[in-house]
Amino acid sequence: MRSHLTGMAIAGSVVLVVLIAVGVRPGAALPWAAALACPLMMIAMMVMMRRGHDHAGDQSADGCAEPSAPVDRPVSR
């Protein structure tokens, strides 16, 4: 939970700095930075999760392990 809030604070700060750098007044930039922090974090999380799936060797695209084929074993009598 704490790292998520830290990430949102960083994203909001970056947006705030960019808005002020392009000439938006700080009073008007602050609400925009707060509102855009959440969607930016969602995009970042989706990119990071997608990157994690690309490296998974035995998992399918939805994150579930591939079902194994039934094994035919001889019946002992």
Image (cartoon, rainbow, N blue to C red):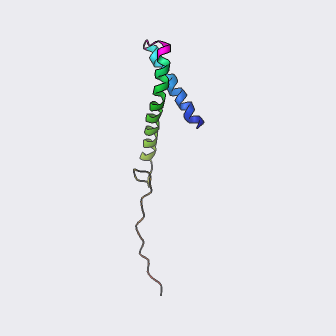
6 to the left or right of 51: right
Q: Is residue 37 above or below residue 73?
A: above
Q: Is residue 16 above or below residue 54?
A: above
**Residue at the image point whose x is 48% and y is 33% from the top:** 41
Span of residues in magenta:
22-28
**Residue at the image point whose x is 47% and y is 15% from the top:** 28
**Residue at the image point whose x is 47% and y is 26% from the top:** 35
Instruction: Return the residue found at the far right.
Output: 2
| Magenta stretch contains residue 36 | no
Instruction: Return the residue found at the far bottom.
Output: 77
Percent of width and height locating residue 38:
48, 31
Q: Is residue 57 above or below residue 21?
A: below
Q: How many numbered marks have been drawn onto this rendered protein structure?
A: 0
Percent of width and height locating residue 57:
44, 52
Image quadrant for the N terminus? top right
Q: Is residue 66 above or below residue 39?
A: below
